[in-house]
Amino acid sequence: KTFINIGTVFNRDTETYYVLFDNYKNNYSKDVYINYLLDSQKDIKVYKVDMNLESNKKYLSEEVNEKAQNVNDLKINGITLMKVSKGKNVKYIIGSENIEEYLK
């Protein structure tokens, strides 16, 4: 479990990775099953962004932008999983049920 600042979402050292945007309280998410599925991913690195942090809250939105390719374009509305490859958003999944289905 590696928590990162939202500003570094697109420029990690890893070539392909997941980023989970969620609200964490004391490093605990109410979406335990999704976190379990992500933690069991052996072949791909997982980073987590805590949307409760003050520095990340400005990216919360009623809208979504599934095509965001830089941090300024991010609009997070609820739990969101993004797959990043070579610095590009290649998959963007919104909502617990959709994320669980994708990870199974």
Image (tube, rainbow, N blue to C red):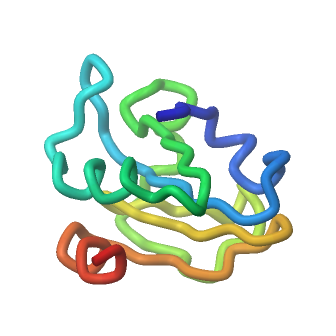
Residue 100, image x, y percentages: 24, 72
The C terminus: image quadrant: bottom left
Lateral position of residue 67 relative to residue 100, left or right: right
**Residue 29 higher or lower than 17, as above or below:** above
Q: Nearer the viewer, residue 80 or 64?
A: 80
| Above-or-below relation of 65 to 73 | below
Q: Residue at x 17, y 46 (%)?
A: 32
Residue at 85% x, 69% y: name it. 86
- 28 vs 11, left or right, is left
Image-quadrant location for residue 18? bottom right
**Where residue 90 sits: x, y (%)?**
66, 81
Q: Quadrant of residue 2?
A: top right
Image coordinates for residue 75, horizontal then vertical, percent:
52, 63
User: Hey, which residue is sitting farthest front in the picture?
Assistant: 42
Q: Quadrant of residue 83?
A: bottom right
In the foreground, 100 or 63: 100
Q: Which residue: 51% across, 56% down?
A: 42
Q: Residue at x 72, y 65 (%)?
A: 16
**Extreme residue toward the top, this view:** 26
Question: How many numbered callouts?
Answer: 0
Of 86 and 78, which appears nearest the observer? 86
Q: Position of residue 92 (x, y in %)?
A: 51, 77
Return the residue nearer the eye: 74 or 20.
Answer: 20
